[in-house]
Image (cartoon, rainbow, N blue to C red):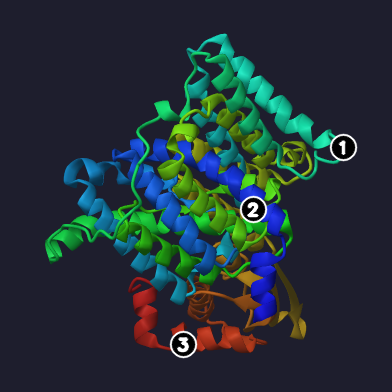
Amino acid sequence: MFETMKQSWFSNLKGDTLAGIVVALALIPEAIAFSIIAGVDPKVGLYASFCIAVIIAFTGGRPGMISAATGAMALLMVTLVRDHGLEYLLAATLLTGVLQIVAGYLKLAELMRFVSRSVVTGFVNALAILIFMAQLPELTGVTWHVYAMTVAGLAIIYGFPYLPVIGKSIPSPLVCIVVLTAVYMISGMDIRSVGDMGELPDTLPVFLWPDVPLNLETLWIVLPYALMLTVVGLLESMMTATIVDDLTDTPSDKNRECKGQGIANIGSGLMGGMAGCAMIGQSVINVKSGGRGRLSTLVAGVLLLILVVFLADWVSQIPMAALVAVMIMVSIGTFSWASIRDLKKHPMSTNIVMLATVAVTVFTHNLAIGVFVGVLLAAMFFANKVGNILYIGSAETDGGSRRIYRIVGQVFFASSERFGNAFDFKETVEKVTIDLSRAHFWDITAVQTLDRVVIKFRREGTEVELVGLNEASATIVDRYAVHDDPAAVEKLMGGH
C-alpha cells in the first residue's frame, strides 16, 4: 500500500508540480467562462474547480487526470439557474454527486467497453474542434497586438522544448504564460486579460448548505437536471480517463473514478460550487507538461485557490492571448491527425461512426448526444456485419425423402429474417432435419423465427427434427419456443 501511494503521489515530484502550475493558470479563465455560461457568479466556477480538483486528487481512479468545472456541465445548468436560482443549482450538484457514487457502486463504468475505438476517436476530435472554437471569440474583432501575442505564444510553446538543458525541464506552456504576461505588463498594450473576464473572489470558500425546502417538490425540480449532469459528467470523465490511459500507457480504476467524481461534486456543492467533471483539455495540458501522478491534480487545485484569492492582482494581468495560445496547442495535440490519414484504410462503417460522432458533438455541443449517436451507429453496423455471417446449406438424403439443413453462424434479430427465408416449405419431403450444431441462437426474435419455420413445415405435413443445439441455445429455445404448444402456435401464426 505504501509503495502504491508513493508511486501515485511522489514518483514525479518536479513534473507534477510544474504541470500543476500550468493547469492552475489555464483553469482560471475557463472556470470564469463556464460560470458565465451557467449564469452564475465567477466565484462559483472557481470554487468548484478548486474543490473538485483537490478532492479528486485523493478519491479519483485516474492519477494525473484533471477534473473541475466544465463547459459541457455548465450548458446543462442554464435553465435551472434561470428559473430557480443558485440555491437549486447547489442542490442539484449534491444530488449529482450522490447519483455518481451510486453509479460507481453499480459498476456502470463497465459500460465503457461498449464504446468502440472509432467513437472515442470521434469524441477526441470533436473536443479538439470545440476547444479551438472556444478560442475564436478572443481572436475576433481584436487588434493586431492579440494576433502577435498569440503567434508569439505558439512559437514559445513549440520552440522552447528544443533549447538545450532547460528546454526539457520546464513546461513550455508555463514559459509562454510567464513571458507574455511580462511583455503585457511592461508594454501596457490594450488587450484583454484575465481580469477582464470577471471579478476574482477575495475570500476562501465556506461551508454552504443549499437554502432550499427539503421536500418532494424540490426533488422533482432538481432530479432531471441531476440525472443529466450525472450522465454527461460520468461519460466525459470515463472518455477522458480512457484517453489519459492511452497517453500515459497506464491503467485506471473507472468505477473508483465514478465514486470519486461523486464525492468531489458533493464537496463542491457544499462549498458553493457547481457540478463538474474531468476536463480533457486540461488533462492533456497536464500530461503534455509532464504531469503523471495525483500530486499534479492537487497542486492545480490548491494553487488555483491561492492565485485567485491571494494573488488576484497578478493573475488578472495574464493576457488572454497567452491562454489562447496554450489552448490552441491543446486542440492541436488532442486532435487525432492519424484518423484523417486512416480514412482511406479503415472500413466505411468505422469512418461513418467517427465522423458522425464528431459532427453531432460539434453541432449540439453536447458530448453525451454525440457519443450516444456514435455508439448507436457502431452497434447497428456491428449487428449488420454479424448478421451477414450466416450460412445455410442443404442436402437431400434417403432417396429424396429427407432433407438436411445445416446452419452456420449467429441467429438473432438482425439475421433472423435471412434464416427464416432460407427454407423451402413447398418441397415434398417426408422429413426435414435442421442441424444447428454450428449455430447460436441469441434472442427471442431468433427463437420466434425458428418456431415459424418448424410450424410451417409441420403444416405442410413434413416431420421436423432439430439437432445439435448447444447448451446456451437450447436453454433459450426450451424456455421461449412454442412450436410444441398448439394454443401458442395458433396465437403465433395469427389464428390461421
Q: Position of residue 361 (x, y in %)?
A: 50, 41
Query: Which label sits on residue 479?
Result: 3
Which residue is at 53% across, 82% downward? 461
Q: CA distance from mark 1 to mark 3?
A: 72 Å
Question: Helix or strand or loop: what does disc 1 sit on?
Answer: loop
Sequence order check: which comes first, mark 1 or mark 2? 2
Q: Amino acid at mark 3?
A: Arg
Mark sitting earlier along the chain (1/3): 1
| C-alpha span from label 1 to label 2 | 21 Å
| Residue 191 visible here | yes
**Residue at position x 17%, y 47% from top?**
84
- Indicate the position of residue 328 as horizontal and vertical percent values: 62, 31
According to the picture, the residue beneath numbered tag 1 turns out to be: 164
Question: Where is residue 173 shown, x and y percent of the image?
Answer: 66, 37
Residue pointed to by mark 2: 17
Quadrant containing the N terminus is bottom right
Looking at the picture, does residue 422 appear above or below residue 278? below
